[in-house]
Amino acid sequence: MAERYGYWTDWLLCLGVALMLGARLPRFMSDNWLPPSSGHVPVENRSMWNYIASWPVVAIVGPGLVLLAFGVLSMSPPEVKVAQVCFGCGYLVILAKIAWWLAIERTEPLLQRSLFIALVFAAVGVLWFLSSSLAAAKTKPVQSPESLLNSDLKFIFYGKERLFCVYTNGTKYTAFKPSLAFGLGDATTPFMYPPSPGHAPIAQPFPIPIKVLSDDYARPGDFLQGPEILADFMGHIKNGDVIFGVAWLTCSNCVTRRAYYIYWKVAEGGWYAETDAKSLEGKRMTIYADTGQMKEYLDKEVPVNTRQIMQPTFVKPTS
């Protein structure tokens, strides 16, 4: 998901720009409106450290580092170490500024300042602990010999205008390196390309590469978004086209390789049905342009009672 949320280095660059902007904000503050008793230091008497440690800078850097940490945790795989460093630095910046402000810049009785800083440190400490716990939970598990061939993944297909998939882990073991494969063809407007250089184009399935997510994993109970299946071919596909074929799903420690029939009518919906993966080995799929022949073939290959209707959007199963 780095392409969706951006790489952590881009987030860090944005934070640096914000830091430079924040450092310049105090220079444009007027001294005329501040009362003499405010303790405000005139602009001409300030050092560079006054700008760096000013509230506008701290208000950008502290929360900015915390937001950066949440951003890198949302990527796949998450940058856990970077997030933990950002959490630590962000909360330390906030605590240090508050402590300095109360100890040096405020003149209230010591007891009041002590109670206030204790409450602030306790609240920020709780947030720090919860944030660190979230980062720790995102740590990539290590595949051990004991975890081999003990997990399983299943597909959920959905979509009306475009075709999507989600894969889920219903076991109590983490599934490593999910592998997704699709063999889909357009029965209405066949996709034509040469089987090899120098040959005439013929109708063939869409050339969808097998996707092995070597850096990804699915924890027990996860529902993970897969790629948009036909994103590269939507310029060819038209509303009303019938897309038919099969999909396979497995992982490096899955006990089985699952296979599914897929029937999707663009802009109208469709269905999918799990089938025995071994029964598809060496089997040539037949795609009929004629609606009657296609229905007869599908009713024979995929009984109606085994089909699951595709929802327009993803709906998480209740059981």
Image (cartoon, helix red, strand yellow):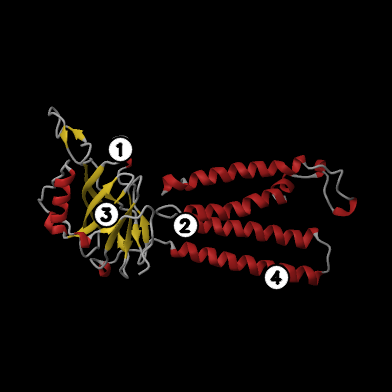
Q: Say if 116 sits above or below 246 in the image.
A: below
Q: Say if 38 sits above or below 254 in the image.
A: above
Please identify the quadrant where the C terminus is shown.
Answer: bottom left
Q: Quadrant of residue 26?
A: top right
Residues under labels 2 and 3: Cα distance? 42 Å
Q: Amino acid at mark 3?
A: Trp
Would you name the residue on which mark 2 appears? Answer: 81
Do we see residue 251 in this rendering?
no
- Position of residue 44 measured from the top left corner of the image (x, y, whole percent): 82, 40
Would you name the residue on which mark 1 appears? Answer: 238
Would you name the residue on which mark 4 appears? Answer: 118
- Position of residue 98 measured from the top left corner of the image (x, y, whole percent): 71, 60
- Which numbered disc, 4 or 3, marks the residue that appears first in the sequence? 4
- Mark 4 secondary-structure assignment: helix
Instruction: Report the number of discs.
Output: 4
What label sits on residue 271 in the rendered view? 3
Q: Amino acid at mark 2?
A: Lys
Residues under labels 4 and 1: Cα distance? 64 Å
118 or 318, nearer to the observer: 318
- Mark 3 secondary-structure assignment: strand
Q: Amino acid at mark 1?
A: Lys
- Position of residue 193 measured from the top left corner of the image (x, y, whole percent): 19, 33
211 or 292, nearer to the observer: 292
- Position of residue 216 measured from the top left corner of the image (x, y, whole percent): 34, 55
- Which numbered disc, 1 or 3, marks the residue that appears first in the sequence? 1
Residues under labels 4 and 3: Cα distance? 59 Å
> Residue, x 73% and y 59% (percent of image)?
100
Mark 4 or 3, which is nearer the eye? 3
Mark 2 or 1, which is nearer the eye? 1
Residues under labels 2 and 1: Cα distance? 45 Å
